[in-house]
Image (cartoon, helix red, strand yellow):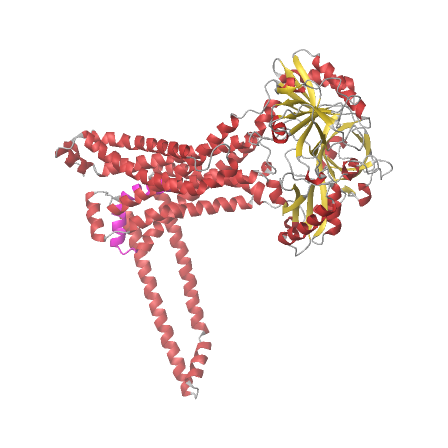
Amino acid sequence: MRLEMETFRVVASRFLALFRRGRLERELNEDIQAHLEMLVAENIQQGMTPEEARYAARRSFGGVEQTKETYRSQRSLQSLETLVEDLRYGLRQLRRNPGFTAVAIITLALGIGANTAIFSAVNAVLLRPLPFFEPGRLVSITSAQIPRMRGREASYPDVLDWRARNHVFGQMAVFRTENFTLTGMGEPEHVPGAVVSANLFSTLGVAPVLGRSFVPEDDRPGSANGTNTVILSHGFWQQEFGSDLQVVGRRIDLDGRLYTIVGVAPSGFQFPIQSEPVALWTTIAVDMPHGGNGMAAERGAHYLDVIARLKSGVSIAQAQGEMRVIVRTMNKEHPNIHPRAARIMPLLDGLAGPARPALLILLGAVGCLLLVACANVANLLLARAATRQREMSIRAALGASRGRVIRQLLTESVLLSLTGGAIGLLVGLRGVNVLIRIIPVDIPRLSQAGLDGRVLVFTAAVSLLTGILFGLAPAFSRSEFALSESLKESGRGPSEGRRRTRTHGVLVVGEMAMALVLLTAAGLLIRSFLSLERVHPGFDPHHVLSVRLDSPPHVSHARQFAFFSQILQRVRDLPGVRSASGIFGLPFSEVNANTGFAIEGRPVAEGNRPVTNYMAVAPNYFRTLGIPLRDGRDFTAHDNLNAPPVAIINETLAKRFFPGENPIGHRIQPGISNGYGDKEPMREIVGVVGNVKLQSLASGPESECYVPLAQSPLGLMTLVVRTSGDPMQVVPALRTVIASANKNMTGYNIKTLDELVGKSVAQPRFVTLLLGLFAGLAMLLAAVGLYGLIAYSVAQRTHEIGVRMALGAQKRDVLKHIVGQGFKLTLIGVSIGITVALVLTPLLGSQLYGVKPTDPVTFTAVALALLGVALLACYIPARRAARIDPMVALRHE
């Protein structure tokens, strides 16, 4: 009774205020019109024409117009006061229903929090501008091989030609990551660094805080008093040199070479942007150790990443068109090099790489989850609004318009959504921190995800739109009623009309459709991931440790292999080691090489030669990794530079180029000549081994060529050690062996092969896990929504059920009828969801392996699972209805 009287007073006072406001407005307009007519008449009497009289009257009417403007300002202030009253009333209503309020806020907080967390990651990785000068003009240029369109890196001679011939770039720079061993400052230390062209810092628009940047002369070998130059990162300068302001000019020993420190980078500067920031930068001169005869001089050595700055006013399309012409001309000028194609993209897009589709898929998934949450809360509001029928009737009786009622109800829903958004913001930020800690893949800039202006605006906008979205249906539904019917219903008690029941049903159908879309996407990814995990990598990764090791600097190829062999022999004698070997080009690592090759007796132009992956391995490598030897023999210690050059190929290369014949005894000529001067030797094929996945379990079969490490030492080797127990237990002994061979050397990138293989499927595993979690939440919310609808329907139809049972209906008839009602809605939702999923799932194509986006098994299994959950959600309230006592039900009002 107190609530009704309070509602009556509020509505009555607002109605009277509106009435008085309308009357004052009419009186003011009448006064203004009368005064205007009087002024016009006076002006005409003074000899003016009617047009002149009206013009003069309007000009002299400023005082009255100002009065009217003042009134309008007062009216705006009164509207603000009305809004404050609506907010206060809405807060009182929510406080009176703590259970409903808590459920609605928690549901919204989960949906908005998930959106905030994923958007924070998307914002940090994909949307936030790069921290460089005018980042919109920075692009990356990739060099792909035609027709395979494989590879990303470019050769240095190609880049020099691009620089000289283009008219669209202001600057063009190259870089590659490198690992250095720092000595002379205590224990040998592995230091991640980058080899760059001298103009990299100026291309990015960054200047050192100490010293100078690189100059063109630094790109020439030994330009600074016989040493190369280096710029330190701000963190490395603080950590290793104690922020010494006199550090410029000092020399440090990296890989046995002296480098002169010429500058210190600004705090926070990082390039390339990656999970492990580089500690220092040196120039391309290190790739020209013999006065220009290194990798940087080879046009066929595609190993450098390229960035460029567009000139002002030049678009990417214009730059792409000019580069297409330049590259086409260069392909004709160098027919002995595989023809290439240059692709240009914004640097930010190149940085995001494969993380972009995964993040966008997750963002779409949490968007669907939020829609399901909105539908759930809308259903809650509809159910709650039925209990407020008497309040709405009194408002209508006192003259409240439909718009006024809608505004009040929307105010309450927006209050709910903003509260849920505030909590969701906290949930989302906490979720981002958890995401950063547990994510198993290296996504650039993800660690920078967090709260900023864009995330705040996104969360506020989502919260506001969510409140309007889930509040519209209940607001319009509760405001559409005939006054006499409403008063009759209010006298009897709350009752759902047919129109409101249909609204409930539409919302439940939408929940089911969205849940099915998410479940289908999750089901496809799960099947894809299971298929991926069943793929055999071609070797046994269990109980195998890998340790990357550089050779001593400035030594011959023979001494490089002697150093590696010495370490291998000592490692094989360690306790717990079953076998050990070494390789350049370990599977699932970042070290790899590919080259064109010729087959003896099959002359092909050098630029059209087929391409193969190229690995240099030590004896016993295939047995250590468990790679099967299909034919021929393994390498031995006798396969050195004094023996005939030999090679082992994999099954794919054998079947592709020696179909129907035995490749053993044939000779091929890979295009890498190290160890044999400038001429690549013909190598006799002495064995065939099984195929190995080199970069990804999802990759198809590729040609592979193995050569003896003794005949092709590349200055870098990865130790592979198979142990009888936990591989990490032999790490201390390995470090001791390496130090005993050379006190200035250290092993790094120590990982098990299980880790390397697992890292290759880390992203699909993580995306599948998150999408499965979101889909499960969506299905749960949809089931709860359906349960709530059926339970509410049963409560409102208790009298009807009693009549049916009194007239002879059996319990199973009641059960069948009520379950059928919910099952019908579920079927409609599933049908719509399947249609939507068929349209959207092709977007997952790049993330799937071994399963089609329209896989019928997945669609059928997901539909049946959702139908089963829906049946359970319907059965529980239906079973309760079937147990109703007819006599009790007949007395129910």
Residue 74 vertical placement versus 324 (above, below): below
Q: Nearer the viewer, residue 628 or 225?
A: 628
Percent of width and height locating residue 674: 77, 30
Between 659 and 278, the residue placed more toward the observer is 659
Look at the image and tell me in which quarter the N terminus lies.
top left
- Where does the C terminus fall, quadrant-wise? top left
Q: Is residue 340 left or right of 761 when viewed as pictured?
A: right
Work out whether 814 lies above or below 717: below
Classify 408 as above or below 513: below
Res 132 visible? yes
In the depicted structure, whether residue 186 falls above or below residue 678: above
Task: Please provide the residue range marked out in magenta.
Answer: 375-401
Q: Is residue 176 magenta?
A: no
Which quadrant would residue 607 be assigned to in this image?
top right
Number of numbered discs present?
Answer: 0
Q: Position of residue 609 (x, y in %)?
A: 68, 37
For image coordinates 86% across by 36% down, the residue present is: 226
Indicate left or right for 666 with 47 as reference. right
Write down the quadrant of residue 378 in the picture. Answer: top left
Is residue 362 visible in this depiction of the protein?
Answer: no
Q: Residue furthest left?
A: 807
**Quick check: is 377 in the magenta stretch?**
yes
Q: Main secondary structure of the magenta part?
A: helix
At a point 46% along the width and 45% down the height, the residue shown is: 462
**Residue at far right of view:** 225
Is 46 or 619 nearer to us in this picture?
A: 619
Counting from the top left corner in percent of width and height, residue 329 is at 71, 49
Q: Is residue 437 left or right of residue 93?
A: right
Give residue 200's position: percent from left, percent from top: 73, 44
